[in-house]
Amino acid sequence: MSAVVDAKTAVTQEIGARGESLIALSHTVHALAEPAWVEHESSALLQRWLAGEGFAVEAGQAGLPTAFVASRPGDGPHIAFMAEYDALVGLGHACGHNIIAAAACGAAAALAAVAPHLRVSVIGTPAEEGGGGKILMKDAGVFDDVDFGLMIHPGPTNFLYARPYAVAHLRIAYRGRGSHAAAYPERGRNAADAFIVAQVAIGLLRQQLPDATRVHGIVTEAGTAANAIPESSVGNWYVRGRTLEELGPLVERVLDCFRAGALATGCELEVRETSPRYAEFRNDEPMAAAFDRNARALGRTFDRGTSGMNTASTDMGNVSQLVRAIHPYIGIDTDAVNHQAQFADAAVTQNADRAVLDGAILLAQTALDFAQEEDR
């Protein structure tokens, strides 16, 4: 036991020695603010940092240009820390993925330095914000030999468990017929009206949906001139449910609403899922308990309930179905909440920088607890 305690102390020291570098890494990723699938500079930055720490870097994992695996060989169990680094279009790092990326790199570097016998990796996972990068990587076998998968996500406050919804990401498009809205209205088929009908139907459907269901979206295109009947309209919609199993019939009921819009307006409907469906998260209870003990020793208390950000969907849920995993939320002490512009501002404050370092320490210390198990 004393050896583990000493190793945890050494982890804290290793993170401290890299503190300025890790905070600079977080701030640079934040400033780049590259959205899903085009995180080229952010990915390259993380790869260079890890190569400087002695990690062997393999880019382009699963055929994805911005995905990577950076690893240090060892005979012990394979500990993998997940890095996310995509930003939200128009909102920047309003989910704080810069903190996730820097904490993952710090945890891996410290753990590799303290326990060189372990196999330690950072898995760089693009497009968490609606693209499902981790799912494509899982399907390509990237996680097949991982024993423990750990990551930490910023939020307003500390929550121990991930309790996300399963989610389907839908691109909805209607094709109608354009016409002059005053002179020849009878020749038109209004694609914008199709969305209005569909949204009214969804609003009424909510009366019969399970409590944990979420249906929400935006219309991104619905005409350009008030005196022209729109011939096309496009929108993005999310349908969320408690589990993948529950999600299937929910999606069909929502799609019926979009079909109603097409039928009522005489438009054609096109539906495309823009990502593999995200699964619910399977928390590894012993690993979560170890994380909680380490957090209390560090002076952080993590709520064990369900509220707010820890119900948000994540493609890490799919990974957790395969690998023993945790996904706690670390607070950056802000009144802003994720996906607000103000949260992006908060993600590079002193509190956010503290979350980078504390998150790295807690991830590495928790990995040490399980690397020492004799009965894994």
Image (cartoon, rainbow, N blue to C red):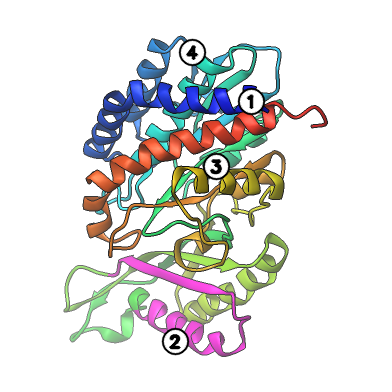
Q: Distance between the residues labelled 2 and 3?
A: 49 Å
* Location of mark 2 (residue): 200
First-in-chain label (2 vs 4): 4
First-in-chain label (3 vs 1): 1
Please name whichever residue, 307 or 178, is drawn nearer the observer in this view of the structure: 307
Q: Where is residue 35 in the image (x, y as percent from the top left)?
A: 33, 42
Q: Residue at x 33, y 63 (%)?
A: 337
Q: Distance between the residues labelled 3 and 1?
A: 15 Å
Q: Distance between the residues labelled 2 and 1?
A: 63 Å
* Location of mark 1 (residue): 2
Q: Which of marks 2 and 3 is in front?
A: 3
Is residue 319 visible in the rendered image? The answer is no
Q: Give yes or no for residue 210 being in the magenta stretch.
A: yes
First-in-chain label (2 vs 1): 1
First-in-chain label (1 vs 4): 1
Q: Residue at x 54, y 28 (%)?
A: 8
First-in-chain label (2 vs 3): 2
* Location of mark 4 (residue): 55
Q: Which residue lies furthest to the right in this view?
A: 375
Please name whichever residue, 24 or 361, is drawn nearer the observer in this view of the structure: 361
What's the amino acid at mark 1?
Ser
Q: Which of marks 3 and 1 is in front?
A: 1
Magenta residues, as a range? 193-222
Relative to 258, residue 114 above or below: above
Please name whichever residue, 327 or 364, is drawn nearer the observer in this view of the structure: 364
Q: Residue 294 carries which label?
A: 3
Relative to 85, residue 170 above or below: below
First-in-chain label (3 vs 4): 4
